[in-house]
Image: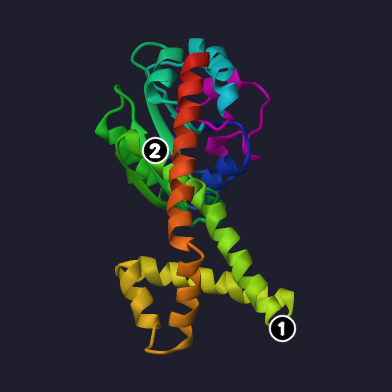
Amino acid sequence: MESQRRIGFIGAGNMAFGIAKGILSGDVLPGNIKEMGITVTHSNVEVVCGSDLVFVAVKSHLISGVLREISPHVTERHVVVSVAAGVTLATLERLLPDNSVVIRLMPNLPCVAQEGALLFARGSHAKPEDGASLLSLLHHCGLVEEGPEDWIDIHTGLSGSGVAFVYLFAEALAEGAVKMGMPSALANTIASQTVLGAGKLLRDSGKHPAQLRSEVCTPGGTTIFGLHSLEQGGVRAAAMSAVESATKRARELGQRSQALN
């Protein structure tokens, strides 16, 4: 049962906090989570020895040292889930004992609000049931999907970094309203609600973004004039390039991690 599984976190940043919060909103007992203000220790080895499922939520440049430290204590009962950006499954498996069960997970910041987008890939020794168990455990964090490892870096560019792109756009919307005379606090509130509402409608309707966009436009109306300005500014191409650049950077980090390890 998931409620009996002992879960440990190495690292306690935003991603670890968001994942732990989502898990606790399910059927896992708070006492079964280590290192997130429930049962706390400064010993990585103690976390591993006291857990069945271990989330390694440290920065990419720290992953090598952490895995070498815990490696002697990782057994066949453990599932190790890495959320280190760019660190490949091959690197994780090389730094852990033979036949270790490893999963690579990429969440994003909205996990903190239980509205995240998470994608994971299983290592060569992780079984389908390991993936199904992780999906069940994390489903309160938001959307959780499994895919090939090649998609992880794309997901990083689309959703991990994409969150910041959305914030930039929301900020620009609010500043446009301020420019036209609306108070800043109100403009920011309305911009955030606009992004939230648009996102929920897009997710729940199942419609293509282009269809929803066309439903907002009326001939000669305000929206088509605004969209024309966005197209003149190259917003579509800039957004595509932003995802491409972030994806390429994630791949570079992975290659650097492999070289260092």
Q: Which residue is mark 2?
A: 152
Q: Secondary structure at mark 2?
A: helix
The image position of residue 22, as x and y in percent, is 50, 50
Q: Which numbered dot is residue 208?
A: none
* Front in this rendered view, residue 30 or 152: 152
104 vs 190: above or below: above
Label 2 packing within 10 angstroms: few (<14), some (14-19), many (20+): many
Q: Residue furthest left?
A: 128
Q: Quadrant of the N terminus?
A: top left
| Chain part drawn in magenta | 31-59
Q: Which residue is mark 1?
A: 181
What amino acid is labelled 1 in the image? Gly
Mark 2 and mark 1 residues within 8 Å of each other at the beta carbon: no
Instruction: Residue 76: tell me if it is visible.
Output: yes
Q: Is residue 122 magenta?
A: no
Q: Is residue 130 left or right of residue 40?
A: left
* Front in this rendered view, residue 210 or 86: 210
Residue at the (37%, 18%) spot, across then down: 100
For the residues marked 2 and 1, what is the alpha-carbon distance in whole angstroms? 43 Å
84 vs 116: above or below: above
The image position of residue 16, as x and y in percent, is 57, 40
